[in-house]
């Protein structure tokens, strides 16, 4: 009977006007982002990368994702701590992130779309549209106003910040986690509206807990959801938050824990499984960390987030630690001032405009998990972390605006017209901004318009370290050819080995290992070509690999070219990856070069 009663309750809430508004939201969300179905994967992060440890660089290929959804890969999704969007930071940082549902969604995409990048992008769009629908339903549950719900959901859907989430495949944790985030909130609000003993209450509670669990398994920062549930209880004076009398702390805790125990138990279990290192080791330069820099970084990034929300023009399609993006005291001062001015203003209106308090605290709670993501040296403003946070701000602004306009029909329609213009402007902005994720060239061009140094860093440092793009069959074929070439070299068949390595280099011209081996093979028969390939190998590693630099210097030493040998020796001596054994080799090399010069 309870299930039948629940079904009848849900059917009554779905009316033609609601269906029409939801359809309109889907259309509004599709228009700015429809072109992503033709987008490629971009060079940085979208390739669901794994590290090629032998080459010291990063390939685009993840064998698990390329093979698709199989029992073995599903088990891998629940066991891996690999965090695909951060290949630059290496295994020590990538392994401390557990989001198995995100990996399962990527595995399912691979199975369904056969590694077509447009399919992955369309899945992103579908998740975003479903989250938009849930935003509308959550706002309706909070206000009972179709105007407020529609404008809140529409702004959430088409704001230019969302272009960086929808257009970037590696932002899947934010999108999938956001979908379950809003689903859990909707189920919790419905659960709170049903009196104890009435049909459906326990079912909605179970659905909310289950959706919350899925949200956390998609993105661990969604552990803040129970705090937002407490916030909604405060806003609607439920479960110990009394409107007319001061609540007693003991009674409040008792009533809150009565409904939150399941969420708290789940959160503890997730933290234990996912490891607290997920949050502690997000500082890629931890040796430089201090609380002063941390405090500065938090408010600097807070100011950047506000700027991107209010003025979404200078958005970057990724968050590399650009050398030109160092934090300054001006950013810190502006962020600190904005925080206290806005918080003080909102708190002063807590009795007359509680919607502002609700929206602002929602925004701040959503930023709690990423408050420390600000690096102590560089700017790591990550716009996709605002995905769920945007709802709170948009909801409070639209609620206040339509409450003011409710005094007359003309005011109400005037406010709605202003929001229509704002939504249209945001949609146009998203249509333009999402183009930054079309392909690697578009990405670099957009970065260069903002920071030439950043674009040069991206192009010269990152891209040469990334390997060939191809499907799983091509990767396996490449490995077989490489093994054959190595066997030919080991057997002393130099001519055929050269042919094999040249064929491999045609497929992957940015692999420094292949150039280095060709230099070794040509050393005895064609010194000119050997010099060319030794130089290629050093250039492809940005003159930062001591082994390649040492071998190049040794080659030129054997060729009696002291100037070139000294040049590569100096580079090798300044390389960052020298081992004690390499240091000894370089000391021997230095003495031999000095003898040659004399």
Image (cartoon, grey):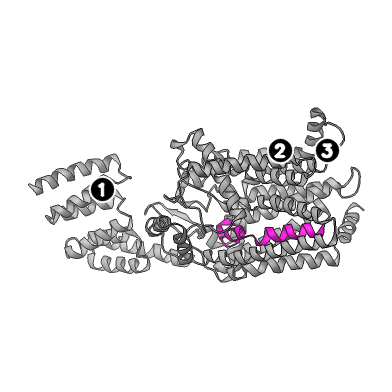
Q: Position of residue 177 (x, y in %)?
A: 65, 52
Q: Can residue 46 be seen in this view?
A: yes
The mark that comes first in sequence, 3 or 1, is 3
- Please identify, in this view, whether the residue under mark 3 or under mark 1 is nearer the observer: 3
Q: How crowded is mark 3: few (under 14 residues within 10 Å), some or many (20 or more)?
A: many
Q: Nearer the viewer, mark 2 or mark 3?
A: 3
Q: What element carries label 2?
A: helix
x and y, in percent, of residue 290 in the image = 48, 34
Residue 296 magenta-drawn?
A: no
Q: Is the magenta stretch mostly helix, strand or loop?
A: helix
Examine the rendered structure and indicate whether residue 448 appears above or below residue 381.
below
Q: In this view, does 168 lie to the left or right of 504?
A: right
Name above or below for residue 258 compared with residue 516. Answer: above
Residue 41 in the image: above or below residue 571 = below
For residue 593, the mark is: none
Q: At x 92% / y 53%, what residue is drawn?
A: 1
- Check if residue 158 falls in the magenta segment: yes
The mark that comes first in sequence, 1 or 2, is 2
- Which mark identifies residue 265? 2
Towards the viewer: 55 or 240: 240
Q: In which quarter of the image is residue 122?
A: bottom right
Residue at 86% from the left image edge and 64% from the top image edge: 15
Q: Is residue 160 left or right of residue 297?
A: right
Residue that badge 1 annotates: 572
**What distance separates the C-alpha of mark 2 from that of mark 3?**
19 Å
Secondary structure of the residue carrying numbered label 3: loop
Q: Nearer the viewer, mark 1 or mark 2?
A: 1
Q: Give the range drawn in magenta.
A: 145-171
């Amino acid at each position: 009977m309870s299930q039948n009663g629940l079904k009848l309750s849900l059917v009554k809430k779905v009316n033609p006007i609601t269906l029409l508004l939801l359809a309109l939201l889907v259309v509004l969300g599709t228009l700015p982002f429809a072109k992503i179905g033709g987008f490629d994967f971009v060079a940085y992060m979208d390739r669901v990368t794994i590290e090629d440890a032998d080459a010291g660089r990063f390939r685009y290929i993840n064998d698990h994702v390329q093979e698709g959804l199989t029992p073995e890969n599903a088990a891998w999704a629940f066991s891996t701590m690999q965090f695909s969007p951060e290949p630059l930071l290496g295994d020590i940082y990538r392994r401390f992130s557990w989001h198995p549902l995100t990996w399962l969604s990527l595995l399912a995409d691979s199975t369904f779309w056969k590694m077509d990048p447009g399919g992955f992008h369309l899945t992103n769009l579908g998740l975003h549209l479903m989250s938009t629908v849930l935003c509308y339903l959550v706002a309706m549950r909070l206000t009972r106003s179709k105007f407020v719900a529609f404008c809140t959901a529409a702004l959430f859907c088409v704001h230019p910040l969302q272009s960086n989430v929808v257009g970037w495949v590696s932002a899947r944790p934010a999108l999938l986690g956001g979908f379950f985030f809003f689903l859990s909130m909707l189920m919790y609000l419905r659960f709170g509206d049903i009196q104890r003993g009435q049909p459906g209450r326990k079912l909605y509670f179970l659905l909310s807990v289950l959706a919350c669990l899925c949200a956390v398994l998609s993105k661990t920062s969604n552990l803040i959801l129970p705090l937002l549930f407490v916030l909604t209880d405060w806003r609607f004076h439920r479960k110990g938050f009394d409107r007319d009398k001061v609540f007693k702390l003991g009674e409040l805790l008792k009533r809150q824990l009565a409904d939150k125990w399941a969420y708290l138990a789940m959160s503890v279990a997730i933290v234990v499984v996912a490891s607290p290192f997920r949050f502690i080791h997000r500082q890629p330069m931890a040796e430089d960390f201090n609380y002063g820099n941390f405090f500065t970084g938090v408010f600097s990034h807070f100011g950047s987030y506000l700027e991107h929300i209010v003025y979404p023009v200078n958005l970057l399609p990724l968050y590399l630690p650009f050398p030109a993006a160092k934090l300054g005291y001006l950013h810190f001062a502006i962020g600190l001032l904005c925080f206290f001015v806005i918080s003080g203003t909102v708190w002063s209106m807590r009795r007359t405009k509680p919607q502002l308090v609700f929206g602002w605290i929602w925004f701040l709670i959503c930023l709690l998990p990423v408050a420390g993501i600000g690096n102590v040296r560089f700017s790591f403003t990550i716009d996709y972390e605002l995905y769920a946070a945007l709802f709170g701000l948009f909801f409070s602004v639209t609620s206040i605006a339509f409450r003011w306009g409710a005094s007359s029909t003309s005011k109400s329609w005037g406010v709605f017209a202003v929001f229509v213009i704002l939504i249209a402007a945001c949609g146009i902005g998203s249509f333009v901004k999402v183009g930054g994720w079309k392909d690697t060239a578009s990405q670099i061009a957009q970065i260069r318009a903002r920071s030439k140094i950043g674009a040069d860093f991206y192009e010269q440092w990152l891209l040469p370290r990334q390997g060939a793009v191809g499907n799983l069959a091509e990767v396996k074929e490449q490995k077989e050819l490489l093994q054959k070439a190595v066997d030919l070299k080991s057997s002393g068949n130099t001519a055929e080995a050269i042919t094999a390595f040249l064929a491999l280099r045609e497929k992957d011209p940015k692999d420094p290992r292949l150039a280095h081996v060709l230099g070794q093979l040509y050393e005895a028969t064609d010194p000119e070509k050997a010099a060319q390939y030794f130089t290629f190998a050093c250039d492809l590693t940005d003159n930062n690999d001591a082994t390649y630099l040492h071998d190049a210097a040794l080659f030129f030493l054997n060729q009696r070219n002291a100037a070139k040998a000294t040049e590569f020796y100096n580079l090798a001596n300044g390389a960052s990856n020298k081992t004690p054994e390499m240091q000894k080799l370089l000391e021997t090399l230095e003495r031999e070069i000095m003898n040659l010069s004399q």
